[in-house]
Image (cartoon, grey):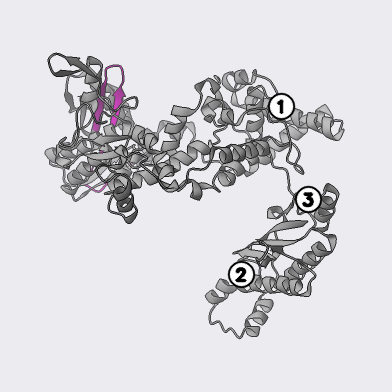
Amino acid sequence: MFNKLCDDISKAYDRVNWAYLDAVLRRWVFVINGVDGCVCVSKLFPMTCLSAMVKHETARGSMHGVKMGHDGPFISHLMFADDCLFFCRATAQECEVLKRVLRDYEEASGQAINLQKSSIFFSSNVDEALRADISSIMGGWHNKKLSKAGNEILIKGVAQALPSFCMGIFSLPIGLTDELERMLNSFWWGNNAEVGKGIKWLKWERMCIDKKLGGLGFRSLQLLNVAMLGKTCWRLIEEPKTLMCQVLHAKYYPNGDFLSASLGHNPSYTWRSIISAQDLVRRGTRWRIGDGSGVRFFHDPWLCTKANFWPSRELCPPHLELVLEADIHKIMSTAVFPSSGVDKLIWHYTPNGRYSVKSAYQLASSLTLDVTHNVEGHWSSLWKLAVPPKVKSFLWRAARDNLPSKFLFYVVEHTDSSFKIRVCMLLWQIWKDRNGTVWNNKSPVPAASVMAAASAWAEWSSVRASAARSSPQQIALAVCLGWHSLPPGVIQCNVDAAFFAEEKMMGLGMVVRNHHGEFVVGRSIILSGCRSVEEGELIGIKEALSWIKELGFLKGVLESDCKRACDAIGSAGRNISEMGVLASLCRAELALLPDFSLRFVKREYNAIAHCLAKAARDFISHHVWTEPPDFVAGLFHIPCSCEQ
């Protein structure tokens, strides 16, 4: 019978007895000049001494570690930075010895054991009575029960991340992933902190649904495994010159590429694992059109649409293939960049065209998970409530009929913010008191329940990091406050894009102001095709730069409210999608205006350009405004106190 103790040193860098450290260093004949060196070893040497103390007790026979196999060594402790694992027999005597070692270490070094982050684990053959005795000896080292919200964070941040290295290389057996998911489901629903048991009110598959659709957003390990293997598949496509790619190419697909490769004869387990993600990669990969020479019109994926990347065709005698009318708009909306050179395979589901595990998992989920598990409701409103996470988790359980009650959707959708908070906190407290009555035989007092709910809300809100909120006057003057004073002769140009889905069009708006913030000239442009937001914003930036150059302005600032577009222009070579090509064209235009800079601004500061973009739908092609139109004229009356 063995137990394992996980120990964390509290503030290891800040807490140290300098006399102790000096004595240790002199004992080791170690001389340090300067304060920085002392800080570097302030944790290293005390932990080394703790290791020596444990080894001493093990040599005396008062502690026994865990033997790793028949001929393997005994392990009494493992250390990494300020985290420690101690192994000993599950007896009161050995736990007393370990407790004494830790107490002596604390007194000598000045450091302290963080009991809040320390825990104890027992082997399966240790009975409950002995577990309780040992936990009491260690003074609070036990498995503390987390709230459902805490369990959620622990599962997502730790448990589901642990096998990620293996899942990026090998396909895990379905039986193993099923067993792991059963364990995670039991852990989340577990009502007994000591034995980890409890009724599982919902299947794991239903809990893996997105939070906006009624689930908890947990990951299916099997789908995550495929998505992570897809990362290796993407390397075979994007980095064909690496040694791994050359070996696999020579062995498994010598006469083609990875997307056309087959399992082959006598494949290795590694290749079986990689090829299992091939179909997912195929479904998310398409061609970015350059000169078009390497893409077959009907036989390769190249349309910029989420549903289907292949054009539909109709066979007509004798040997004609006609495009269906439904695909004409899709073809017209797909960007083509002959100047960019060769065609390139990209991942459709990320803005930069490069594969990501997150987007691949979302694609796999949409293709695999049962849509009948989705539950209608105002789930987004529920998760946005300004209440503690444990209360949101409780409300989710209630709304999923795991408590049950569905009147909550009316509360979160049709009542004011203050009422929502009071109702949600009180319901959570009532449920907590109900559990105390059923399991601990407590008798709650209604008035005390109300006070406890109010106290819990006050405590949580006091420690919550709240962002500074603007007053109504500040909101009204958003455009004014977004203005920065400029030197004489320097202009500011704001640009924005608006999208009209019904007309399958998009509008661009841009406005030039002088260094006083006064209107100089504006422009509205209407374009056919309705592309992604980022592509539309980049097209607007490119058009604005060309227009500024035509007008003869040499110094100024160009502002956009699309951060992704601004970031794409600033990060050369990292984006291989259509968005990346547009960003490179914007960089080329910006290089011709060396005294111009591009910066991101909040949307409310870009209101004038947005209004001009929306007005573009009233014109056939484009319109130049020499005077500010009535619908934005009021935004140019800037009080002197607003200028910065």
Q: Residues within 10 Å of mark 2 (few under 14, many from 20)?
A: many
Q: Position of residue 169 (x, y in %)?
A: 45, 48
Q: Is residue 496 magenta?
A: yes
Q: Residue at image x 32%, y 41%?
A: 352
Q: Secondary structure at mark 3?
A: loop
Which residue is label 3 attached to?
125
**Amino acid type assigned to the residue bearing label 1 in the image:** Leu
- State the image coordinates of residue 387 (x, y, percent, origin top left): 63, 33
Q: Quadrant of residue 211?
A: top right
Observer-side mark, 3 or 2, equals 3
Ranked by sequence position, the earlier of labels 2 and 1 is: 2
Q: Is residue 374 above or below residue 271?
A: above
Please name the amino acid that badge 2 sits on. Answer: Lys
Between the C-alphas of marks 3 and 1, the distance is: 41 Å
Q: Earlier in the sequence, mark 3 or mark 1?
A: 3
Residue 260, above or below 103: above
Left or right, 29 with respect to 309, comes to right
Which one is nearer the viewer's eye here, 113 or 263?
263
Query: Where does the magenta region start and end?
Result: 483-510
Which residue lies under the disc numbered 2? 43
Q: Is residue 488 visible?
A: yes
Mark 1, residue position:
427
